[in-house]
Each structure stands twice: as structure tokens, then as C-alpha cells.
Amino acid sequence: MKILIGSDHGGYTLKEDLKQFLQESGYQVLDFGTHSPDPVDYPDIAFLVADAVRKDPETVGIILDGAGIGSAIVANKVPGIRAAVCSDLYTARNSKEHNDANVLTLGGRVLGPGLAREIVKTWLSSSFLEARQARRVKKILEIENRYLKS
């Protein structure tokens, strides 16, 4: 599985840790930046990752900023993206099982590396409960489609 990852300066240190963890776990990781702790705007990075996931449904995205919230808001503006900010194992598992989340957002100023690694591991190992949840995710897509320009 290919994982697309990106962060602003608030998530940079945690992104670097997670990138190494993912590579050591055998995942192919494509880093969309930032590549230093210098300030950058999270919407720019979040959009790059979310748009790339939109273009390649075989990928998933992980975006980090200070709290994870701003990146989730940006990513969810991209059609076809279901981004979830997660700070615990339950929400990580639930976001995949119930919402078929294809982007995970995390707060670099909220989580330590140990918990962040567990959240990522749980999120990546969880699967969409299609038989139970497909109807609800279809409704999310229908709402999204109401607002897309033709």
C-alpha cells in the first residue's frame, strides 16, 4: 500500500517519525512536505495530499498539523475525500470501519510519537464494514455531489 504523507511545521517532527515507522513497517511512503520545521501554511500541504489521494484511490493519506483539525477541514473540501482527525485508537478504527476514511489527520502538538504510531497502525489495519455502512457512506457522497459544479 502506498501512503501519501504531509505536514506543516506543527506536524513536521511527528511526520518524520511516522514516515520512518511506516517505511520500516514495509509501506511505500511518498512525502509531500514540508521538509523542515520552517513555517508553512497547512492548507497548501493538506490540499496536495488530499488531491493526490483523490487521483489515486489505491492510496491513503496521512496529514499532520498542530491539532489535525485544519488539515481535516481542508482535505474534506476535496471531492471523494473522507478525512478524519483522530486522537485515539477508537476513533482511528471507527473512521475506517464506519466512514471508509481515506485520509487520517493527526495533531503534532496533541500526540506523542508512541500513541501516534499506534493510531496509524490501527487505522491502516482497520477495514471498511461495507455490508453495514455502505448505505451511509453513499449518503455522504450524495450530499457531496449536490455541491459539485458540473
Image: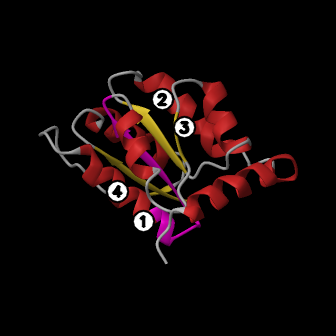
Between 121 and 101, the residue placed more toward the observer is 101
Q: Nearer the viewer, mark 2 or mark 1?
A: 1
- Looking at the image, residue 52 sits to the left or right of residue 97; the answer is left
Cα separation, mark 2 vs mark 1, equals 23 Å
The answer to the question of whether label 3 and label 1 lie on touching residues, with beta carbons closer than 8 A, is: no
Between 81 and 141, the residue placed more toward the observer is 141
The answer to the question of whether label 2 and label 3 lie on touching residues, with beta carbons closer than 8 A, is: yes
**Residue under circle 4?**
47
Cα separation, mark 3 vs mark 1, equals 19 Å
Q: Earlier in the sequence, mark 3 or mark 4?
A: 4
The answer to the question of whether label 4 and label 1 lie on touching residues, with beta carbons closer than 8 A, is: no
Cα separation, mark 2 vs mark 3, equals 6 Å
**Residue under circle 3?**
120
Q: Nearer the viewer, mark 4 or mark 2?
A: 4
Q: Judge whether residue 30 can be spotted in this image.
A: no
Secondary structure, mark 2, is: helix
Q: Amino acid at mark 1?
A: Ala
- Residue 17: give x, y in percent of width and height: 36, 36
As drawn, the label of residue 124 is none
Q: Amino acid at mark 3?
A: Val
Q: Earlier in the sequence, mark 4 or mark 2?
A: 4
As drawn, the label of residue 52 is 1
Q: Residue at x 51, y 25 (%)?
A: 87
